[in-house]
Amino acid sequence: MLKKRLFTPGPTSVPEDVLLEMAQPIIHHRTDEFIKIAEEVFKDLKYVFQTENDVFILASSGTGAMEASIVNLFSPGDKIIVIVGGKFGERWFELGKTYGLNVIPLNIAWGKFFNTEEVEKVLKENPDTKGVLCTLCETSTGTHFDIESIGKIVSKLPQTVVIVDTISSLGAIPCYTDKWNLDVVVTGSQKAFMLPPGLAFISVSQKAWSFIEKSKLPKYYFDLKRYKKVLEKNDFPFTMAVSLVIGLKKSLNMLKQITLEKIWQEHHVRAEATRNAFKKLGLKLFSESPSDAVTAILLPEGVDGEKLCKLIRTKYGISIAGGQDKAKGKIIRISHLGWQDEFDVLTAISSVCIGLETMGYKLPVEEGIKEAISILFKQDN
Amino acid sequence: MLKKRLFTPGPTSVPEDVLLEMAQPIIHHRTDEFIKIAEEVFKDLKYVFQTENDVFILASSGTGAMEASIVNLFSPGDKIIVIVGGKFGERWFELGKTYGLNVIPLNIAWGKFFNTEEVEKVLKENPDTKGVLCTLCETSTGTHFDIESIGKIVSKLPQTVVIVDTISSLGAIPCYTDKWNLDVVVTGSQKAFMLPPGLAFISVSQKAWSFIEKSKLPKYYFDLKRYKKVLEKNDFPFTMAVSLVIGLKKSLNMLKQITLEKIWQEHHVRAEATRNAFKKLGLKLFSESPSDAVTAILLPEGVDGEKLCKLIRTKYGISIAGGQDKAKGKIIRISHLGWQDEFDVLTAISSVCIGLETMGYKLPVEEGIKEAISILFKQDN
């Protein structure tokens, strides 16, 4: 029997307490009991989003919430700027194109950082831009983008909103929805929220509501205006994924108790330990602006990343992620998300070293582990 | 501590074995292990749908699958006929209108049966009709509609497809997707599939695919053409609700073992016992074509159905459903769906009688129970 460990950037490990909470007998979604749970969950989501805005729960993957933000805010022909620095930036681009928007892509090489000044420049050249769509952590490359600065720029433009995909990052790294003036923030359940996939969350600012009022794109399942009417009663427009919401209540309670600041710090330490361990081992990071949510490591020339991941998963039950699309085979990605502690970090690093050794690439594993331990167990952490 | 029992027409009770299956550690959705589960699940869904067509799994509620069938098959301005005999027929109507279709509603009073000849007549008057959208069991009224006949009529029209909402009925009552020539069949996880809400399923015929090729409505999250490309590898276009699919594997296994014919028969007996018990008690059924999936009972004049449901739920932990919209307060609905046995039927009937007595309406409960037992435990069942 293999012990299963998840280091993929979603799904992530779910705490046993949350799994058991969801294994309780199902209750109906239109009862006082469930409405009370929903009330608590809607409130606690605001804490994790750091917002006073409404946060909606959708029964969908994160992509559903990305689609929701486009079909609710815009009309065909609307001009949007999309920051495309990986697979999930591309998803914004595809979504915009699908719904007939006038999409200006701001292309960045995978793993590279982007200069916020460029966004400012393109916005000046296109004063009729309705939205800037971006990603807090581009999961495909492990890159952190400076959303705070984009929020600052866009907040000065009354005709433009900023929409952020924080699917693999909200709850793991700092994201201040209100302080940073983020109009729409979307995320999913299977990352820092320590839940199975199946729920998505979306917050909507007052400025975004004024866009929603004018939007002409058709929507039904993802219609937020319709949702808003029942949200006041802590209800849902359609049957909600009851068991996942019950799990969410539990996981939000855990997040609240630990506090966001502490969770962010813990993710930072796990990421820092992983990054430095692999540097010590002689490997390079794929991203020049690495995120604390997920670390992408460039593999030595000739090592097939897909094969490495499969080997580690099959032999040791440990799931780390390979690269996607153009990074396929070239990188591995280790997530620091959710239900993990310091020893899990040591496990992830060791498993990669042991896997590489099996494939003929011996690394000084003890050096990496020593480095990681020195960061993970520093007295002042 | 109250023992919780669900007699709502979704969510329904989930077997303990399925709950525990879903409480196992989460696995990643792009691994051989999960792909093997997906392969089995996609195959077994075809059995429950009684089809050779592809069946897709969506991470959404059933309404998401209804939306998927509209945005994938049609283009703005397309003419469709919608059978509207309750809240869920209305949902087809609203969806069609939202997406700019030319919707002809075929309105039927709530609880009334409809004459298939009328569909034939409207189709003759509108030979440019692209689709007939209907409901196998109209859950809001407990009414069974004759979908087989509609399938027969539409199968003769090469330019028209039939799309059926079987959300509260597939797996509970006979529905032969292929034999009845049903082009698109949509359903949800939280009914006869004995799962929590959060998944929807949709089958697509060859004829429907030719519509999909021509459809001009925009779609992304629900795009079936995109999905079809990865379905061949038993993969999903977006992160799937892993734990629910793992539960689905278990529940499909149970359904297969019992066999559909036996399950349909059991639902029929439970429904028949409930209907006859309430008739014996002097109450009337709300529907003139009652479905074996859910029984809607007209309450005595002056009894508030909402109050009755709340009383039974609060005092005894038993959830039965009240009426929706125009039937609110006037009816109660008892579902026969999913994980139920004969004694559960006696419990549901008793709870209504006891609740009514508390509210001042004494009924001869023993007469109802006697009648139900005689049907439930007939030797030849």
Image: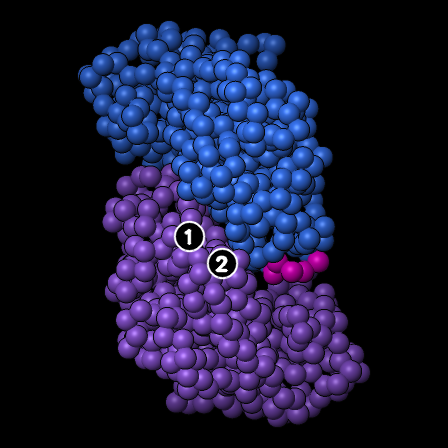
Chain colours: A purple, B blue
Q: Most extreme residue toward the right, as rendered? A: A360
SS under mark 1: loop
Q: Is residue B34 left or right of residue A335?
A: right
Q: Residue at x 49, y 68 (%)?
A: A103
Q: Is residue B350 left or right of residue B256?
A: left
> Does B30 appear in magenta?
yes
Q: Magenta residues, as a range?
A: B28-32
* Spot occupied by residue B3 in the image (x, y as percentages of width and height): 38, 35
Q: Which quadrant of the figure has residue A250?
A: bottom left
Of the 4 image quadrants, the one containing the C terminus of chain A is bottom left
Residue placed under numbered mark 2 in the picture: A100
Whether residue A304 is visible to the viewer of this picture, yes or no, is yes
Q: Residue at x 57, y 74 (%)?
A: A86
The 10 Å Cα crowd at callout 2, few under 14, some 14 to 19, many 20 or more, is: some
Q: Residue at x 32, y 29 (%)?
A: B324
In this orientation, which residue lies closer to the viewer: A7 or A327? Answer: A327
- Above/below status of B80 relative to B107: below
Q: Which quadrant of the figure has residue A129?
A: bottom left
Dot 1 or dot 2, earlier in sequence:
2
Amino acid type at image mark 2: Gly
Residue placed under numbered mark 1 in the picture: A217
* Spot occupied by residue A366 in the image (x, y as percentages of width and height): 65, 89
Report in which chain the residue with disc 2 lies. A
